[in-house]
Image (cartoon, rainbow, N blue to C red):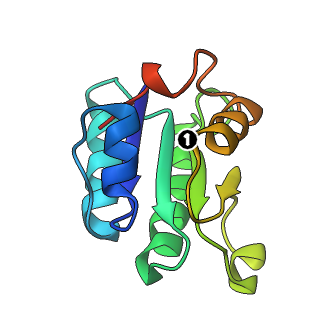
Amino acid sequence: MRVLLGSRRERSTLLGWFGQAVLVEDAHSAIRAFCGAWDSRDPFDCAFLDANEPWSRLAVARFRFTESLLGVDQIHPLRVVLIGSPSLAWHRGPRVDGHVRRPLAEGPLSEMLESVGVAEHGLRDLAVI
């Protein structure tokens, strides 16, 4: 399982659950990582982004645009999970698959990941890349 992490506030919590990570700091690094994963034929399965970071909406819009250009939006779409409370602007923006509220708890996060089709075996089997 490959996961993209772009949430500064929850890094230590998520790192404790996932074990390893390469973190992205902004939309440009997130998009580069996303495109690089597709170039190497090892795409991400899930992205965790901070709902309150201004760059998160841009990153999700670019993820969705790139998926449609590559023709993979139906085959292997990236599952995008927002951390925190999304503003009303998210309801008119690019599609996200789920969100979890702060503070993060392992139980609700595991349930949400299962509901969007990832983490069939729980949090311990995910790797944050």
Q: Residue at x 58, y 29 (%)?
A: 76
Quarter that holds the C terminus: top left
Vertical placement of 54 versus 47: above or below? below
Where is residue 33 shown, x and y percent of the image?
A: 28, 48
In this figure, what is the number of numbered marks?
1
- Work out which residue is located at the far top of the displayed protein and give it: 121
Where is residue 19 shown, x and y percent of the image?
A: 29, 32
What residue would you read off at disc 1? Answer: 78
* Front residue of this view, candidates 106 and 129: 106
- Determine whether, in the image, residue 26 is placed left or right of residue 119: left
Vertical placement of 23 versus 72: above or below? below
Quarter that holds the N terminus: top left
- Amino acid type, mark 1: Leu
Where is residue 10 shown, x and y percent of the image?
A: 40, 59
Could you tell me if residue 66 is visible in this image?
A: no
Q: Which residue is drawn at 34% across and 69% down?
A: 27
